[in-house]
Amino acid sequence: MAVICGKLFYKGEIITAGIEIEDGIVKRIDKKLEGEQIDGLILPAGIDVHVHFRDFEENRKETINSGSLSALFGGICLVVDQPNTNPIVDGADEYKRRMDKAMKESYVDYRLNVALTNRNSDSLIETLKEIEKDYFVPAIGEVFIHHTNPDLQIPYDTLSMIRKSTSKLITVHAEDPALIDEDSTQAEIKSVERCLELGNFHFCHISTYDSAIKISDSESTFEVTPHHLFLSYDDLQNLGSFIRVNPPLRSRVEAEMLFNGLQLADIIASDHAPHTLEDKKDGKPGFPGVETMYPLLIYLMKKGVIGVRTIVKLISSNPARIFGFERYGEIEIGNYANFAVFDLKSVTKIRADKLHTLAEWTPFENFDAIFPRRVYIRGELAIEDGEVKIDPGLHKHEERSGTE
Ligand code: DOR
Ligand code: ZN
């Protein structure tokens, strides 16, 4: 049993109190508790529901090990990995193979979506049932309405059929293939409209204010990324082919509108999509971002641009609620003791060579940020002042406190 004391976010307020932790779980929160005094603000560690940790045949781009280390340094305690790997995770064997790997190699808690492809659409519901005997599957996704790999580009009819056959969360990358070359903004908006006619979804990385309004008028939910909020096509012309990401960066005006409509969003997620420098030169779409997301937000909190409640809601409590991660989301009695501690005085510039992803670059180079001084995962001090204190391997976390 341990007690840490300091300023913490509890039930929507910043209070000064102690947190008693036993077997990785918060047992008590009380002003009277005495224990180790922690400098800085203790917030729930983040959940990133959209990362591409590659690995398998693409381990030069990222691995579960490197991606999860990057997550940890960014104050993230749980990731949802996407199955558009090589090979694609669209069957029970690949799913198990990847989860086994994460069990040995991940630094943070790890969950994996299952892919919908044109090969598995007839058997996916059965496959899902089989996988769910052994694992908690967060969602079917990310389902691509447009993709350069024809196996991954899913027709609306198939999406509709799957939507009707399960109540499972489905996450959709909505870009309409018919419009993508002509008008990529409309490609997103029209695709969102079509999907909303088919049922309820969770929309990945929404990049336009119009889509945000449409989704928020429905039962569906959506994510935004830091890059669509804080970067724009207008500002990053100098990036050349590195600017490519799907959906693309929008104009400065559109990004500002999306940011001003942040109260409409349910989740902030990075869409961490690392590539090698060579691949970026060749125009491969995707930005790394799992390590910089929470630090960028905390800096903006210090500047008074975003409130702490909004940040915690978008990065922790809503992801846990929408994806069904029990014992995550809030600093609360009975939940895992997953915390990120930020010293608001230690503002640093983001530098690619200080990050832990294999990507070797960041679109946020030179941006101000506040990285966590400490991260606790299930009560264990996992990093402190830039130093890793734990070995990778999920079983270690889970042995301590079990899984949902
Ligand atoms: O830019 C992107 N890259 N968008 C996606 O949706 C997929 C991702 C990737 O896997 O590279
Ligand atoms: Zn995507």
Image (cartoon, grey):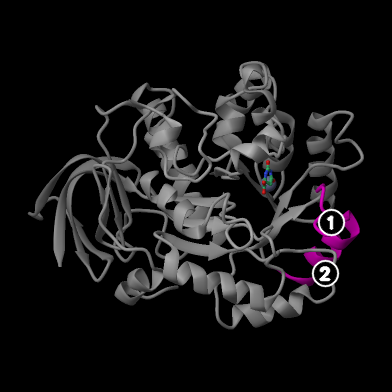
Q: Amino acid at mark 2?
A: Ser
| Element class at badge 2 | loop
Which residue is located at x 71 percent, y 74 percent? 91
Tell me if 139 is positioned left or right of 297 in this view. right
Mark-to-mark CA distance, 2 and 1: 9 Å
Q: Residues within 10 Å of mark 2 (few under 14, many from 20)?
A: some
Which quarter of the figure is the C terminus placed in? bottom left
Quadrant of residue 347 in the image?
top left
Looking at the image, tell me whether mark 2 or mark 1 is earlier in sequence order.
2
Q: Amino acid at mark 1?
A: Ile
Query: Is residue 205 placed above or below 227 in the rendered structure?
Result: below
| Element class at badge 1 | loop
Q: Which residue position is annotated with label 1?
A: 154
Tell me if 157 is positioned left or right of 120 in this view. right
Say if the magenta span includes residue 141: no
- Name the spot of residue 357 as percent of width and height, x first: 47, 45
Magenta residues? 146-167
Disc sitting over residue 121 in the figure: 2
Tell me if 314 is positioned left or right of 242 in this view. left
Inspect this view and state whether residue 46 appears. Answer: no
Tell me if 261 is positioned left or right of 74 in this view. right
State yes or no: discs 2 and 1 in contact (Cβ < 8 Å).
yes
Disc sitting over residue 51 in the figure: none
Which residue is located at x 24 percent, y 71 percent? 23
- Name the spot of residue 207 as percent of width and height, x first: 68, 33
Which quarter of the figure is the N terminus placed in? bottom left
Query: Is residue 94 placed above or below 118 in the rendered structure?
Result: below
